[in-house]
Structure formats: C-alpha cells, structure tokens
Image (spheres, helix red, strand yellow):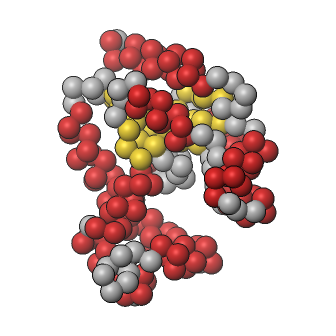
Amino acid sequence: MLKIGLTGGIGSGKSIVGKAFEMMGIPIYVADVEAKRLMASDFGVRDLLISRFGRQVYDSNFNLNRKLLAEIVFHDETSLKDINAIVHPAVREDFSRWCEQFVEKPYVIQESAIIFDSGLYKSFDKIITVTAEEELRIGRVVKRDAASREQIIERMKNQLPESVRLERADFVIYNNADLILPQIIQIDKQIRSLIKK
C-alpha cells in the first residue's frame, strides 16, 4: 500500500479533490480534521497544550478554545512552532494507526495543507499538489469563510509559496476552469501502475 500526500494552498480545492478520490474508493485521512480531534480528545495532546499554554485553552468541559488558540498562534510564531511540535507527532502516529486498517487498498491519501512546510512529505511515496490561480483561490475563500480579501491574502502570505509546492509535487491537479475529474482519474492510473511495478 502506497501513502500519498495531497496538498495545496488555501482555496486550491484540495478537499474537493480528496472527496473525488474518496468516491473512487480511496481512503482519505484529513489531517486538519484529525488534528482538531486529537487536540480535543487525546489526553496526551491535551496535557501538553495545557502545560504550554495554560488551562484557558480548554473550557470547563475540556472543549478546545480554538478561537483563543488561533489568536495566540497568529500573534506569536514561537507559539505556532510549539503547537506544531505537540500536534504533528500525534497526527503522524494517528495516521500510521489509521493506515493499518487499509492494507488491502492500493493506496491511501493524507490531505494536509502543510505537507511540505512540516517535513511530512518525507513520509509519503508520492505527493499530489492541487493548484489554482490566486484570484480564483481568494474568491473561493472569501465566499467559503466569509472573510475579507485582505485577511485571505494575509493567510496566503503565511503559506509556502505556490511555486515551491508545484516544484516539489509528483503530480499536479489544475483546479482553475479545468475539469478535475479527468486529471484525478489519470493520476489514479499512474499511482496504480507504480504498485504493479
């Protein structure tokens, strides 16, 4: 079973691409969703977050105060690194356990915006990058998140440059006006051919 990374910048459409692969029977692990789950329910992760950031990052019922955590991280790069140092290893372990249930599948996919930024790319057999024109991405996120154009541009500045993602990718899906399903089917065939070799 191959492990495939699926990445792309904000608004690129990586989640839509992930859902398309899932509809084709490929298991998808969405790292962002699972990281939130682990921060909310994994006692080890929770204890480390409380130890580093204080009890206030959880309410009285131990629900994660995402808004407070986001504010802390947005204003302090060291805090972001500290959160990543706590959460990334937990996600890696969780992904490994998750993969065990799919050994009969030809491949699994982990969707993550930060595959290259975090060094996760080293643990994948191949990487798929989803890309789209910047203006299109901004428009998508403005609609999706009800955020301002300026906020989206600021978030984009905090991400790895698109050129770096494209350069490091094994496969690229162009999600502009292009149809993505034919691209996904072609990549699926290419990945399956790697397994047969």
Residue 135 placement (x, y as % from top left): 79, 45
Name which residue lies at 75% across and 48% down. Answer: 139
Left or right: 87 in relation to 81: left
Name which residue lies at 52% across and 16% down. Answer: 186
Name which residue lies at 40% across and 32% down. Answer: 22
Residue 183 placement (x, y as % from top left): 57, 20
Residue 138 lies, with reference to residue 151, above or below; the image says: above
User: Could you say which is closer to the camera, residue 79 or residue 101?
Assistant: 101
Can residue 185 be seen by looking at this rendering? yes
Name which residue lies at 64% across and 58% down. Answer: 145
Numbered disc total: 0
Residue 66 lies, with reference to residue 163, above or below; the image says: below
Left or right: 145 in relation to 150: left
Can residue 79 be seen by looking at this rendering? no
Q: Quadrant of residue 73?
A: bottom right
Quarter of the rendering occupied by the C terminus? top left
Left or right: 89 in relation to 121: left
Quarter of the rendering occupied by the N terminus? top left
User: Could you say which is closer to the camera, residue 192 or residue 66?
Assistant: 66
Residue 103 placement (x, y as % from top left): 22, 30
Left or right: 13 in relation to 162: left
Residue 111 placement (x, y as % from top left): 46, 43
User: Could you say which is closer to the camera, residue 187 or residue 66?
Assistant: 66
User: Could you say which is closer to the camera, residue 47 or residue 16?
Assistant: 16
Residue 174 lies, with reference to residue 139, above or below; the image says: above
